[in-house]
Image (cartoon, rainbow, N blue to C red):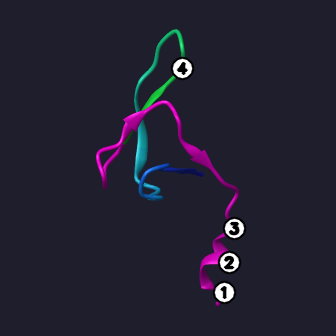
Amino acid sequence: MFQCPSCGSREIFPVAGGYLGPVYLCHVCGYRGSLVLEADVDCDDEDRD
């Protein structure tokens, strides 16, 4: 699962690819760049307090 490094949103998607790799765009804050956070998240983790 990818997350935006600026706002932490999961609404981040690849918009371009090229020689150096993909460029991502965050639909929440508008971040555009090749750096994203990747995390392993289980569905059950969101329900825990």
The quarter of the picture where the C terminus appears is bottom right
Residue 26 coordinates in the image, percent (x, y) = 36, 46
Query: Which dot marks residue 48?
Result: 1
Q: Which residue is mark 4?
A: 21
Kind of element beneath mark 3: loop
Disc 2: CA contacts within 10 A as few (<14), some (14-19) or many (>=20): few
Q: CA distance from mark 4 to mark 2?
A: 32 Å
Instruction: State the residue in front, 22 or 30.
Output: 30
The residue lying at 60 percent from left, 51 percent from top is 1
Amino acid type shown at disc 4: Gly
Q: CA distance from mark 4 to mark 3?
A: 27 Å
Disc 1: CA contacts within 10 A as few (<14), some (14-19) or many (>=20): few
Q: Which residue is mark 2?
A: 44
4 vs 2, front mark: 4
Query: Which dot marks residue 42?
Result: 3
Which residues, given as a range, are shown in magenta?
Answer: 26-49
